[in-house]
Amino acid sequence: MKIAVVTDSGSGIEKSDIGNLFVIGMPFRIDGCEYFEGVNIDKRTFFDIMRNKEASFQTSQPSLYNVKELWDNILKEYDAIIHIALSSGLSASYKQTYALALDEYQGKVFVPDHHRVSVTQRGAIDSALSMIEDGYSPKEICDFIENTGLNSSIYIMVDTLKFLKKGGRVTPSAAALGELLRIKPVLQIQGGRLDAYKKVISTGVAKKTLVNALINDITTRFKTQYEEGRLGFGIAHSDDIEGAHEVEAMILKKLPKLKFNHIDYLSNLISCHTGPDAIGVGCYEIYKRNN
């Protein structure tokens, strides 16, 4: 059976160099103008605007017309599609694609609710691709992705409250006080939802908080998966690669045998909410191949 995987750029993947992996660029608006990640705007332009202009950023989800068109083209060459959309807790994209698959593509398109985003979503994609190579059916792959979806964790440090304020996640008065006190929020994503974790003062303390939170999860919640080689790791950043590598070094100092699967940019979609210079770390259960 010939199976393709479709995902969106919320995973951090903008373009695919893997034959059976297809990526939909997530739409967002800057001052009312629509852009598609990886299509008509690059990272440098995006972050230049974010850093240097008082622009308005709004996120959205792919049109069902574009999703349907992509599926139809893929199904000319493939027997089935596994569509790994952005977490249902963060976007309406999952519900829309699931309903479309149920109505018009039963037995052809499968849309698992994996509760993941960014580096953890990428882990679900990697697992799906490996399981396809090992001969699993679409249903078996989706069952694995859904059953392990909540076995994931992300922590994100945010450099400024400005963009959280614009998105309505903090009040203007709280944002003003936070900026005055130089508070660095640390957020968490558990089960696909973005929530507060801790508020700290200074970037250095925020990085230590990230590291300690992730290591605590690895050595407690996910100890079995880690010891059995079934845990993947990733770091993502919004235009702060040096900070990302600093966090990597801090983690490796405490867990020297750990290997990061990905160190890459946060998607523009997520960066619209975090602003520049955010750093996220994540761990997630993965499919472990026998060979």
Image (cartoon, rainbow, N blue to C red):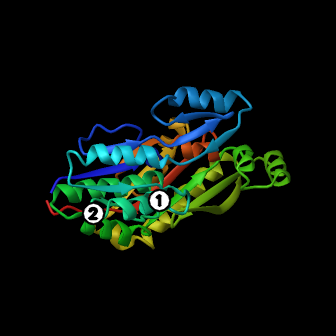
The residue at the point 57 percent across, 53 percent down is 156
The residue at the point 20 percent across, 45 percent down is 77
Which residue lies under the disc numbered 1?
A: 94
Q: Position of residue 253 (x, y in %)?
A: 44, 52
Secondary structure, mark 1, is: helix
Q: Residues within 10 Å of mark 1 (few under 14, many from 20)?
A: many
Q: Position of residue 265 (x, y in %)?
A: 48, 40
Mark 1 or mark 2, earlier in chain: 1
Q: Position of residue 153 (x, y in %)?
A: 48, 63
Does residue 248 appear anywhere in the picture? no
Q: Quadrant of the C terminus?
A: bottom left
Residue in the foreground of this view, choosing between 76 and 120:
76
Which residue lies under the disc numbered 2?
A: 287
Residue in the foreground of this view, choosing between 176 and 17:
17
In the displayed structure, would residue 144 be above or below residue 18? Answer: below
Q: Is residue 193 left or right of residue 14?
A: right
Secondary structure, mark 2, is: loop
Q: CA distance from mark 1 to mark 2?
A: 22 Å
Q: Residues within 10 Å of mark 2 (few under 14, many from 20)?
A: many
Look at the numbered discs 1 and 2 and tell me whether their residues touch, using CB distance below 8 Å. no
Q: Nearer the viewer, mark 1 or mark 2?
A: 1
In the displayed structure, would residue 113 be above or below residue 275? Answer: below
Q: Is residue 81 left or right of residue 214?
A: left
Does residue 9 appear anywhere in the picture? yes
- Splitting the image into 4 quarters, where does residue 263 fall? top left
Q: Quadrant of the N terminus?
A: bottom left
Residue in the foreground of this view, choosing between 111 and 232:
111
